[in-house]
Image (cartoon, rainbow, N blue to C red):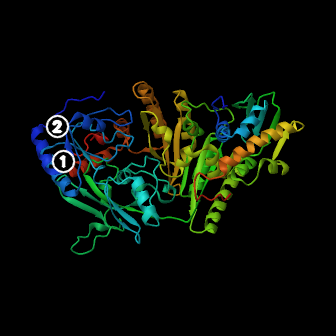
Amino acid sequence: MTDVIKRDVFENVEKETALNQLEKIFGKANVSDKPHDLYPYSYDMTESPHHMPDMVVIPENVDQIVEFVKYCNQYRIPIVPYVSGNNVGGLTIPEFGGIMCDMGKKMNKIIKVDESLMYAILEPGVTFGQLDSYLKNHTNLKYGLAYAPPYASVVANSLLSGLTNLSCCYGGMSDWLNGLEAVLYTGEVVRTGSCFISKEYREDNWFVRYPIPDLIGLFMCWQGMTGIVTKAAVQLWPRKNYNTALVAIVYGSDACAELIREFGRSECCEDVSAVPPDVVKMTFGIEYPEKQPEEPDWAIIISMSGNTEELLKAKVNYVKQIFEEIKKKNNYRIFLANFGPFVDVLGKEFAIYYDLPNIITPLYEWDGCTWIGSYANPNNLGPLMEKCYNLFKKYDIGPIVYMKSMKASHYAVFRPIVRYHKGREEEKVKKLQHELLEVMLEYECVPYKTPRWITEIIRKRCDQNWIKLLEKVKNMMDPNGIFNPGKWCL
Amino acid sequence: MSIINQPQDILGLAIKNMLEPVLEDEKILKKIKNLNKVIAMDLKDLYPISITFNKGLISIDYGEKPKYDIKLIVSFDAFTGMAEGRGGLISSFLKGKIRVKKMYRIFTILKFASIFIPAIKKATEKPIIENLYNVL
């Protein structure tokens, strides 16, 4: 049941008055305070506490958002930006109430694709599926797929340092932002990146982010607490003619960690991702998989591409050479195979690990799903895997651990994921999550898309000058605390 | 006619996934009904499984049942080769990539091959992921 914590969102203006004003801005059909319209915004699939918003608005252009923000700032009404609510961190749950600004419904246009300079300007509601489909049909470019539902937002994921199946080459999605447009608390519209030059002097151009001061950072990973981002330019990448994928079957966490790291460093792979075979079993419908004594511990999926067959083969040969060297040096029990036939043998359910919908299906089969996503030190993956896997077993919860080499293994992603039945497993899940977090912090992981409970723990360990700076920036960007209040405990 | 258990291991699940589609084929069904045997399959780099045919029912279990009728010892390379269409059961056997224990039960071997070969062929005749090169 959704809780309604006591609060006073409308202490400075009557709710009815606010509703009338918002209807003037957005049109009556695009504003609601009806519980049945608000309920879907009050929760997500995680264990984060539920909370009802007071209203929802559905904008369709920047001018409306400008008027909206000015009004809310005048009366100090909280605004929670929302697209699809798939962040797996409770980030769009309005923990202090307020107004949901749902940009997923009408602000979902691909404004421009510049094929020559390889970028696209997107509204926040543009989804991975939508962008991929557009690029496939109209260009020879691609973006990337995020191991998230195809209806997840590209811009929101970029702002939250998400990752894709090209991140082994190009890093997190934040690195792919050329610029953005945001509405500040004053209602001013600001543009950062190479689009910072006034239109009086130059045609709109969003081709690069630097070398000006990087003000994009004022909105990056702030979980919507510093302004409403209304569009963003994302980098696109050439679609290659020849593609392949391999799968490494691995016994032992140290072997898996070394392979992930070294495959990433080879600079030949678009993606290097690992999961335990338990995930495969869950895909077959086994709810609580038991590892058999001689079964492998991990499977690594490696995807590669090349503009010519020769180039692709050369890359594969180099990766194979790395594999053989590691196998020989350590006497690891590891095997390498083509991924395509592996999928043919296991079934079409496994093709989604390579292409759209590109989701780990077991995650979405139950009503509860939560994770601790983190950027990790690649040298620590071995003990992280071992310890976190054992914690899953301790709590008798099916282990889903997802790892990825990022940006040629400058860093990695380490993400233990818990699917659970809401209402009857939450306490157990919370205990597991706390123990997982302790291990991850011990091994230098930096959590991302942090829910409140993780933020509270991290804040205690932060350098206090960092916290002070965080608070100063927040106060500067949002002096009345209207933007997604409560996140990062601010 | 069905596979009566849900295997709890990856290899067992893969074998089940390959066998299920051919259970719709009347000719193969007839062969399965006539094959009341236990086939041990040792994917020697990984682990063994047992496929039990009993009056038309099939069960697939982790590990090697002690009283098997024949045992196929298959290298990882041979198994993936069959899945990729690089080598069939017979040619892999002739090349020594598959060894058979209790070889004298030649009719059991042939009967099992006549079920397993179409199963592999059916699973791999049309790649699920298009435009993906097998370059290893």
Q: Where is residue A426 in the image (x, y as percent from the top left)?
A: 41, 27
Q: Residue furthest bottom?
A: A201
User: What residue is at 11 percent from the left and 46 percent from the top?
Assistant: A21
- Residue A179: image quadrant is bottom left
Asked if residue A490 is positioned above or below residue A180 in the image, the reply reads above
**Which residue occupies the foreground of this view, B45 or A219?**
B45
Q: Where is residue A26 in the image (x, y as percent from the top left)?
A: 18, 50
Q: Distance between the residues labelled 1 and 2?
A: 16 Å
Give the side of residue B134 with respect to residue A21, left or right: right
Marks 1 and 2 share the same chain? yes
Residue A79 placement, left or right of B26: left
N-terminal label among 1 and 2: 2
* Amino acid found under the numbered disc labelled 1: Pro
- Could one spot residue A332 in this view of the protein? no
Amino acid type at mark 2: Val
The chain under label 2 reads A
Task: Point out residue A481 in the picture as x, y percentages from the top left corner.
Answer: 20, 44
Nearer-the-camera pick, A474 or A170: A170
Q: Name the residue under label 1.
A: A479
Residue under label 2, please give it.
A9
The spot of residue A462 in percent (x, y) is 36, 42
* Position above or below: A63 against A98: below
Q: CB atoms at circles 1 and 2 under 8 Å apart?
A: no
Looking at the rendered image, the disc whose residue lies closer to the viewer, 1 or 2, is: 2
Can the viewer see residue B8? yes
**Residue sitting at 53 percent across and 27 percent down?**
A396
Is residue A384 positioned above or below A6 on the image? below
Identify the image quadrant of the N terminus of chain B: top right
Callout 2 secondary element: loop
Mark 1 surroundings within 10 Å by alpha-carbon count, few (fewer than 14), some (14 through 19), many (20 or more): some
Given the image, what chain letter belongs to the residue carrying mark 1?
A: A
> Looking at the image, is A284 positioned above or below residue A168?
above
